[in-house]
Each structure stands twice: as C-alpha cells, then as structure tokens.
Image (cartoon, rainbow, N blue to C red):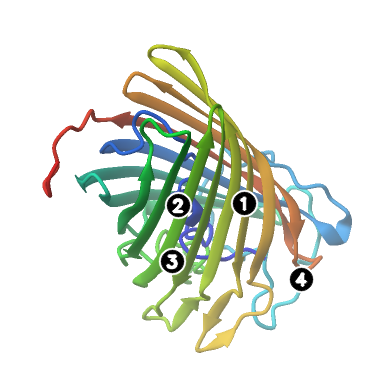
Amino acid sequence: MVVTAMLLLPFVSAACDICGAFIGITPYDNQSSIQLLHRYRSFNGYAAASQSPQLFPPGAWRVPPQSTYSPLHTTHGTDSVPPAYSSSDFEVFRSYELRLKYFIHRRIELNAFIPFNHNTTRSNGEKEALSDFGDPTLYAAWHAIRRLDDVKVQQRLILGIGTKIQFGRTALRNEKGERHHLMLQPGTGTTDLFLYTSYTAGYKKLGVNFNAMGKINGTNKFNERIGNSAVGSLNVFARFQLNSNTVLMPSLQSYYEYSKGIYVNNALETGTGMNVGMAGAGAELVWKNMSFQLAAHLPVYEHAASSNLSSAGRIVAGVTFNFNQQNYWLGN
C-alpha cells in the first residue's frame, strides 16, 4: 500500500513537494531562498476490521525505541496478515528538511534538500522509533515559460531534472541484531533519477497549478529496490493582496502517488505497492520576504489490501526566507 520514491514514505511524498505544492504567482517566485519544511504522514486502522484511520493516532508522538519492527501497511512476501487488528497499531513517518534554492540565471535554479527522518511504529503493543539523516536531493530546473510581469494571464512552466543521493543509513539493527525493514530505515541506499514539470497560470485573483514527477530508482547493497514511481498534484488557488507587504493564497489541492512496491532480489514483495489519491486544502502567506506554507491532505481513493493499515493522510508545513536577488551568475 505505501512505498514510493523519496518518501517510501520518507522517500516519496516529498517528490511532489519538489514540484511545488505551494507554487503560486508571488513576488518571490524567481528568487533564491532558504526553507525549513516538515512533512508528516500516518497510517492507522485496518480496513478488514472496519476501522477508521486517524491522522494523529494515540501514542504516535511519544514512542520509545523497542526491539522489533514489522511494516503493517504492507504484507511482505509470504508473511501472513497481522495476528490481531489492533486499532492502536500505527505507522508514522516524519521528515524535517532544509531546502536551499539559488538562481544562477533568471530562468535557471539549483536546489539542494537535506532531510532528517523520524519514523515510528506500534505493532501489537510493541513500539519503535528510528531517527537519522536521510538521502539528500539535488536538482536543477529551467523556467521554460516565464510570463509574470504586466501580462493579463500570468504563466510559468518549469522543467527539471535531479537525483537523490545515497547517504542515509540503511543497515540499522535492533537489539537482537536483526536489520530493520527498509521502510523504517532513514535512507534507501540507492542513487535515483527523477524528471518533473510544473505549470502555473494565474488570471486576476485566481490561478491553477499542475505538477508531475517520474522517478527511476536504483538498487542498494541488500539487492533491494523501490519500484519506479509517479506523483502528481493539481491545485486551484486564489491570490489576495492584504496590504503592500502581505499576500495570502488559499488553495484547494489534490495529490496522487503510485509505485508497484519494493523488489528484493528482483522479486516484488506482495502488498508493498502505493496507489493512493488525496485531496485537501492549503495556504501560503507571504509577508515581505518571508513566506509561510501549510497544507493537509486526506485520502479519497486507495487501492490496498484490506489487511493492511490504511493511509490516514499527510500534512506539510514550511517557512521560507526569500532573497531579493537582483544579479545572477549567468547574466541579468
């Protein structure tokens, strides 16, 4: 049910956030920036037991390290379903990211993301947590269409290419010396390639933003590979100029992600795929050269085994400092 690229949870949901879940047409669209971003994703409730998923399951915020872990939103290989459908079982994935963006040209941007992942789980009363730095992401983007000034319909088309570099640890073990499952590890152990596009159009106070991304994943030293993935989003937003220094952009958002799952020794592990669609709302507040972002998405469609934990939703929050950039390495 859940496994994808840059947030296997931590390794895939981020993928669409790269494209720009918070892209509007603001005064700082083409400015270098520093951003702190937090992503939260939870799984809770068994469809087989008619349990409703909770975005914030009890106990998810204080989970001491224990000794065993078995992913609950998937059934791996020949593993059977969980022995009991406990409503207290959950999986929660958090990522805290430092994001750096620098424009070397009015139409060319370079980006670097440095994540710190904190993954927690509870299964049959046993709790576990792992925290460490994840895999950094580097990418470049070209603003192929940039019609933002003094035009009736503002437009922007971005084409990008990037890579996720193996850095985060993938061999963390429990007290018994058993290696934790890949889904709980801070890193994937692979170097991956992705392509993406983002299109934004605005007319007066209204706008629309579409993002799409495809990711090709490598194989790690344990002969594990996350299946190639695709993510996309469609957002409709409004732009309100509150005063000379402040812009507010509320939005309605939709989000989709897909991956076949995890391959071990070239064999697909049953039940590890991701095919889920979400919808929700978000807002971006721009004040002077600062901006604040918040979005929440709940599942509206999910194709998963009834014995797996259900996707409960995701939350993304961020704060960005924008530079008033006037000069560029490659011309002004």
| 74 sits left or right of 28 in the view | right
Q: Secondary structure at mark 1?
A: strand
Which disc number belongs to residue 173?
3
**Residue reaching furthest right?**
50
> Which circle, 4 or 1, is nearer the viewer?
1
First-in-chain label (3 vs 2)? 2
Amino acid bearing label 3: Arg
For the N terminus, the quadrant is: bottom right
**Is any atom of residue 4 visible in this view?**
yes
> Which circle, 3 or 1, is nearer the viewer?
1
Q: Which residue is mark 1?
A: 255
**How far is mark 3 from mark 2, CA to CA?**
34 Å
Residue found 34% across the figure and 37% down from its top: 35
**How far is mark 4 from mark 1, CA to CA?**
28 Å
Instruction: Judge by depth and name the residue closer to the eye, 89 or 235.
Output: 235
**Residue reaching furthest top?**
243
**Residue reaching furthest bottom?**
266
Instruction: Judge by depth and name the residue closer to the eye, 7 or 220.
Output: 7
**How far is mark 4 from mark 2, CA to CA?**
36 Å
Instruction: Specify few, some or many for label 2: CA neighbours under 10 Å numbering under 14, 14-19, or 20 or more.
Output: many
**How far is mark 3 from mark 4, CA to CA?**
23 Å
**How far is mark 2 from mark 1, CA to CA?**
12 Å
> Which circle, 3 or 4, is nearer the viewer?
4
Height in image: 178 above or below 243?
below
Instruction: Specify few, some or many for label 4: CA neighbours under 10 Å numbering under 14, 14-19, or 20 or more.
Output: some
Q: Which residue is mark 4?
A: 81
Amino acid bearing label 4: Val
Q: Position of residue 47 (x, y in %)?
A: 83, 58
Amino acid bearing label 2: Cys
**How far is mark 3 from mark 1, CA to CA?**
34 Å
What is the quadrant of residue 235 in the picture? top right
